[in-house]
Image (cartoon, helix red, strand yellow):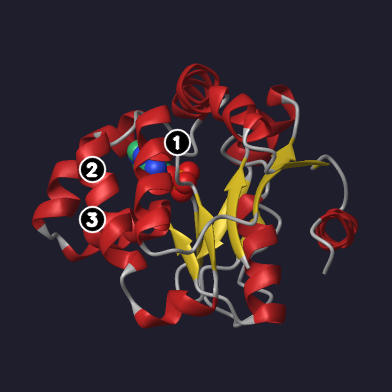
């Protein structure tokens, strides 16, 4: 199962990916997580990406395409993968198609988690993540309900940056919805519901 997750930041892609990964044991390729790890480690990639991420802008295509292309060479992706946060531009989508056709592993679906942008602003500004296990919770979680770890707010989850990220999404990423519809790969899900209800719909729509 080779899947691309589409949807605005905060639509619930990470949450749904985590559920799919747990149930189907597929690698979760989140470019946001990969970049945040690079920033934390202070690698050259992290240093290059940090200012774009802090502003809510996209990291340049060549940087991110190289990162994902390399990740797709790993053996663990042969059984399938969940791509979360990539592609985000037409150039990335075209590069992904080219790489997957080279690997003879075409996409099975582009899953769109659809949520209204005002709902997203509320969700993201109250979103908190676990420092230890990456669990995604809310400001109501004093500690991680999964592992007891410390919860923190991402640097880019403040309102001004969130609004910029939504603008960037509309301009650069939303056109990919039509792109994947044209390839007959688009599966759209209403993401403004309880995560477990959304997940049941995700599985049904993917025929799982
Ligand atoms: P995310 O965790 O997916 O919301 O990503 C956090 C930030 O990482 C984004 O706001 C971008 O700055 C950067 N980023 C993640 N994925 C990509 C991508 N595919 N293309 C460009 N920038 C990305």
Sequence-earlier tag: 1 or 3: 3
Residue 192 appears left or right of 10? right
Q: Is mark 1 within 8 Å of ligand 1?
A: yes
Question: How much space separates mark 1 and mark 2, taking CA atoms?
Answer: 17 Å
Q: Which residue is mark 3?
A: 39
**Can you give x and y, in whole percent of width and height, for residue 95 in the image?**
34, 42
Pick whichever, 61 or 51, lies toward us: 61
Give me the residue at 42% from left, 29% from top: 90
Ligand 1 shows up in which quadrant of the image? top left
Pick whichever, 199 or 145, lies toward us: 199
The quarter holding residue 188 reads top right
Q: Which residue is mark 2?
A: 50
Pick whichever, 173 or 103, lies toward us: 103
Question: How much space separates mark 1 and mark 3, taking CA atoms?
Answer: 20 Å
Frontmost of labels 1 and 3 is: 1
**CB within 8 Å, label 3 to label 2:** yes
Pick whichever, 91 or 106, lies toward us: 106
């Amino acid at each position: 199962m080779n899947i691309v997750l589409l949807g605005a930041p905060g639509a619930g892609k990470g949450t749904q990916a985590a559920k799919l990964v747990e149930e189907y044991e597929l690698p979760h390729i989140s470019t946001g997580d990969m970049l945040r790890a690079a920033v934390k480690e202070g690698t050259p990639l992290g240093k290059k990406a940090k200012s774009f991420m802090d502003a809510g802008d996209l990291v340049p295509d060549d940087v991110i395409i190289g990162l994902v292309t390399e990740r797709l060479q790993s053996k663990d992706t042969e059984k399938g993968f969940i791509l979360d946060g990539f592609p985000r531009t037409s150039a990335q989508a075209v590069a992904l198609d080219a790489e997957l056709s080279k690997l003879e592993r075409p996409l099975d679906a582009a899953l769109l988690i659809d949520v209204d942008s005002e709902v997203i602003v509320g969700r993201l500004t109250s979103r908190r993540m676990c420092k230890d296990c990456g669990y995604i919770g809310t400001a109501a979680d004093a500690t991680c309900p999964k592992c007891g770890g410390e919860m923190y707010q991402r640097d880019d989850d403040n309102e001004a940056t969130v609004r910029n990220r939504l603008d960037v999404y509309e301009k650069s990423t939303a056109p990919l919805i039509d792109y994947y519809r044209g390839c007959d790969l688009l599966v759209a899900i209403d993401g403004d519901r309880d995560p477990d209800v959304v997940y049941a719909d995700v599985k049904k729509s993917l025929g799982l």
